[in-house]
Image (cartoon, rainbow, N blue to C red):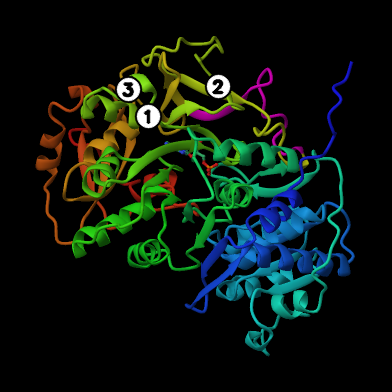
Amino acid sequence: MLGLMQNQQLLISALIEFADRHHGEGEIVSRRVEGDIHRYTYKDVAARSRQLANALDGFKLPFSARVATLAWNGYRHLELYFGVSGTGRVLHTLNPRLHPDQISWIVNHAEDSVLCFDMTFLPIVKAIHSRCPTIKHYVAMCDADKLPADSGIPGLISYEAWIGAQSSRYQWPSFDENSASSMCYTSGTTGNPKAALYSHRSTMLHAYAVALPDVMCVSARDSILPVVPMFHVNAWGIPYTAAMTGAKLVFPGPAMDGKSIFELIEAEKVSYAAGVPTVWQMMLSHMQTNKLRFSTLKRTVIGGSACPPAMITAFNDDYGVEVLHAWGMTEMSPLGTLCTLKNKHLEMSAADKMKVRLKQGRGIFGVDMKIVDGNGSELPWDGKAYGDLLVKGPWVIDAYFKGEGGSPLVDGWFPTGDVATIDADGYMQITDRSKDVIKSGGEWISSIDVENIAMAHPAVAMAACIGMKHPKWDERPIIAVVKKPGSEVSRDELLAFYEGKTAKWQIPDDVVFVDGIPLGGTGKMQKTKLREMLKDYKLPGV
Ligand code: AMP
């Protein structure tokens, strides 16, 4: 017997219609490429998304056609989130930090039909357009009078002229909620990049989950600053959850430096922000140098790479901001776990609470996880046994776009490539990417643990631990360190700093001071590049 409830498809268009009707006055504030601040409301987003939908229909794009973006976090990008997916086309967010050769490869693989871009990225579009035969329309996300006369891009039109000519009345189509809504290519550290193809259903379920109190706890009273880019995994789903809850959205545009982010937080009374550790590192050092304080920021979600304990302490103890450590991946829409305390932790000492907060967090309803050993046997949840982390759930990938790489699943589970422990309370802790873990004398050393200790030293701005070949131990860790400007620490001082903080054999064999650590397109440290940089390095005594 079937239930007798209405069978309404979960579609992204419903989010913006809801925000229009129930939170029409809710604000969206964006720092624009032009440098000024733009503000409008959910009512405006909805009306302009409908204009965009009419404009897309005018291009006669088929259902599931890919509409690509090369854009910062901003209001026009938000309209594309709703307008493109709402009509049944697929929003393909391109990562502008990739090399133009990679971008054109991805565009051709995705067979994008339209490319909408912020003017900042005109040089990229100039570099790739002759190599991207599938793109039939180029749209510059600017006013008509800002369109360069001599762009060299055939048929280039301005976004404002394009949608401005359209009616703001539109009937969003209904279709199967399993239809594709957006896509994002993985960083592609090995081989060619592969795309995760999200569906309306997976996006909507993920949006509900993100709003939960023990996840990001998003409400109509929040003012949210997603520093995490809209070009990578849909800014962790925040644009959808914001429309679902009526939260105010504040977009940083291209200004990602510490000063600009801090000023935006203060000016727009941001209560909650989300980003990767490298962004917060820049903001904290700007605040420390200029002795600044927050007046409204209450919490920040930090993920994408392990959040160093020193950062959690700085936010919490120095600025009264709660850090929510989160873990996920492109293939998971992205959220898998988020770290909030349980009742039993509330009475604990600050030091014990910190041990919990450092973990990547508890599973969210909708993501099932397990850890397995080399034979695929499940390991206990005791906080000690570590193994390969596998996940499954309705917003976890089933297959990559065009079946690239074959089925990624093992008995229905997606292997994340991360190595983790899970404790008896269900808190998962990443010890490493499986390819970054350091295998020393038959034991594993977590590069994240080694980095976290270095990051706690006041003179260290950034630290990356990698394994170096060793004739006796197989591999030994070294730590590459970027010093804070004006700060000093010697190799021996830093190695002495490890004493008593970790087992002796886990202390790195050497410290290498570098000017910078290579970062990938999503702000993650690129250890493959670091290894190349240090290819002539020799371990002491080897
Ligand atoms: P991406 O798909 O590019 O977002 O990268 C996903 C990968 O980033 C994960 O598989 C982890 O290796 C890493 N990652 C994400 N969040 C965290 C975190 N909080 N701690 C440690 N690693 C993380």
* Label whose residue precedes the other's in the sequence (2 or 1): 1
Q: Is residue 447 left or right of residue 123?
A: left
Residue 345 tag number = 3
Q: Are marks 2 and 1 in contact (CB under 8 Å)?
A: no
Prevailing secondary structure of the magenta residues: loop
Identify the image quadrant of residue 457: top left
Q: Where does the magenta region start and end? A: 403-418
Determine if the C-beta at disc 3 is less than 8 A from ligand 1.
no
Please, what is the three-letter code of the amino acid marked with disc 1?
Lys
Q: Mark 2 sits on what residue?
A: 369
Reply yes or no: does residue 411 show up in magenta.
Answer: yes
* Element marked by disc 1: loop
Determine if the C-beta at disc 1 is less than 8 A from ligand 1.
no
Please, what is the three-letter code of the amino acid marked with disc 2?
Met
Reply yes or no: does residue 97 show up in magenta.
Answer: no
Q: Is residue 11 left or right of residue 452?
A: right
Q: Do the residues labelled 3 and 1 touch (CB within 8 Å)?
A: no
Return the x and y of residue 124 as percentages of the image width and height.
60, 70
> Is residue 285 at least partly visible in the picture?
yes
Query: Which residue is at a point 44% across and 52% down the rendered structure image?
Result: 523
Indicate which label's residue lies in the foreground, 3 or 1.
3
* Figure quadrant of the N terminus: top right
How packed is label 1: few (under 14 Cα within 10 Å), some, or many (20 or more)?
many
Q: Mark 1 sits on what residue?
A: 359
